[in-house]
Image (cartoon, helix red, strand yellow):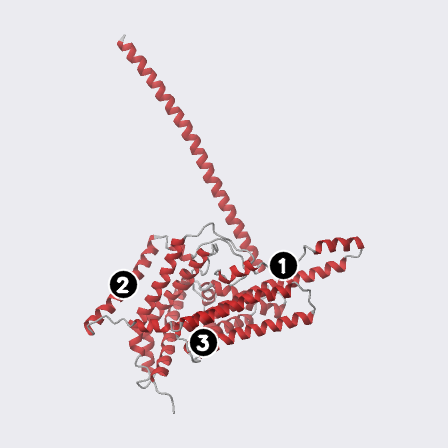
Amino acid sequence: SALGHDIDDYDISYQRTTDAIEKFRTRFAKRLNEDIDLIINDLVTDLEEKKADLDLVRSSKRQHEKVFIPRQSVLTKLLEVSHFQTIYNIFVALLIVIILNTVCLDLLEKGRIDIEFEILTGSFNKLPTTFSIWLAMLFTTLLVYPVFHHWAKHDGSFPFDVFWLLLYVAYLVAFLVIPAVYVSKHKLALASSMIVVTEQTRLMMKVHSFVRENARCILKHRKSSLSDDDEKDSSKAKKIDMKNSETDLPPCPGFSSYLYFLFCPSLIYRSEYPRTSNIRWGYVVTNFLQVIGCTMYIYYLYVRFCLPVFRTAGKELANIKTYLRTIFSCVLPATLMFMLAFFAILHSWLNAFAEMLRFADRMFYEDWWNCKSFGNYYRTWNVVVHDWLYAYIYKDVVLLMYGDIKNRSTFAMLMVFFVSALFHEYIISVCLGFFYPILFVVFGGFGVLFIPLTQRKSKRGWNIFIWLMLFFGCGLLLCLYCLEWYARSLCPPNP
């Protein structure tokens, strides 16, 4: 009887275990099916969104219009890969080695640490004056909105529009000249001057984009309104039109859209941009720390490798041998400075502001380091400025010449290079305090000639050629500008 009782207990336990296993299998299969359905639905939704974005991009390319879609910066995605994280770590290790090298040499030669931070701090002189000039520029930029709104809400005649156009051109000229005059008047140092002039250029480009995009919409609205009025003959149609005219206002955007555009990392105005759902403040702080780190990195490279060479400028007779020795001494440091400046500004700085403003389109540059043609390099290394030049220089010149953007124009391309080189040279001239058009010649001359030379090249050797030209171009620019700066500083003026 005891054995039978044990057998009954075993059967009951077996049945319970079997029922539990079956229940678990049913629940597991149901949960697995739900998870698979959820994953598939998310995947399909993601693919549909990406397809919609791609269709939007293709449509924009056909219409030659800039379209903003949510996407990360190239380096943000690459730095998620361990191999690229190692390259990042190597640059950090190099910075530590350079600092240790400078400290050790100072201790051995001078008995004290003398990193010469006065050069860096001296570049940021008169910060209150710099901030005041920036505030004045921002205030005049904000005044553009009410003036533009006043023009937009009036159905002006041709003389009325011409008057406001001339007023706008006069504003741009004054905005270009007056800050430069104040920089020279107050004798702002290099970094302070750079803050004023680069912000001046940025605000000018943003104002022009805002006016250009919205003026086009308003003029189209006026034209369509006039054509609609001409087509309405009956009194009933006129009454309906009068009723609708109260809501059919000119498409002038709100002030909040304009204010957001002034600070978001884009030079192309849109009434709406794709936005992220939240702000990652840790990511913002990391990017600003990277900007500070890159600034210190550039400073150490300059002090350690370039400053000893330039301090003798003007004290010995200049000849080809001297120039070649100086250029080759600057090639590696200058290229590293160029790459660090790119990472600090186009990646870290813009991503920090994009994160704070929840700006989702972070394609500020593309993989320019893989380019095999100079034309592709110019289009990809600074997408933010390229989009503006294409939209408001190239397209407008082509439209004026042919009336159709589908046509290609060498003259329009040359105008883009001329305007870009001119403003680059303007920024450098105002910051340094003298006109020495090396960048204008290198960028506007040789930079243009290299485009047909490297056009439609696909072999690996052309990427090496582009990097060689970047190495020597950076070295040449740093060498010649610094030599001229120190020669003017160290040599007595002519009697």
Label 2 Cα neighbours within 10 Å, binned few <14 / some 14-19 / many ≥20:
few
Three-letter amino acid code of the residue under disc 1: Pro
Q: Is residue 206 left or right of residue 465?
A: right
Q: Given contact means CB atoms under 8 Å apart, are the residues at marks 1 and 2 in contact?
A: no
Q: Is residue 193 left or right of residue 112?
A: right
Residue 477 position, x and y percent, is 39, 75
Of marks 2 and 3, which one's residue comes earlier in the chain?
2
Q: Which mark is residue 183?
A: 3
Question: At numbered mark 1, what does the secondary structure look like: helix, strand or loop?
Answer: loop
Q: Is residue 456 left or right of residue 150?
A: left
Q: Which residue, given by chain and number where applicable, does mark 2 sit on?
A: 96
Of marks 1 and 3, which one's residue comes earlier in the chain?
3
Circle nearer the viewer, 2 or 3: 3
Residue 257 position, x and y percent, is 55, 58
Question: At numbered mark 2, what does the secondary structure look like: helix, strand or loop?
Answer: helix
Q: Which residue, given by chain and number where applicable, does mark 1 sit on?
A: 251
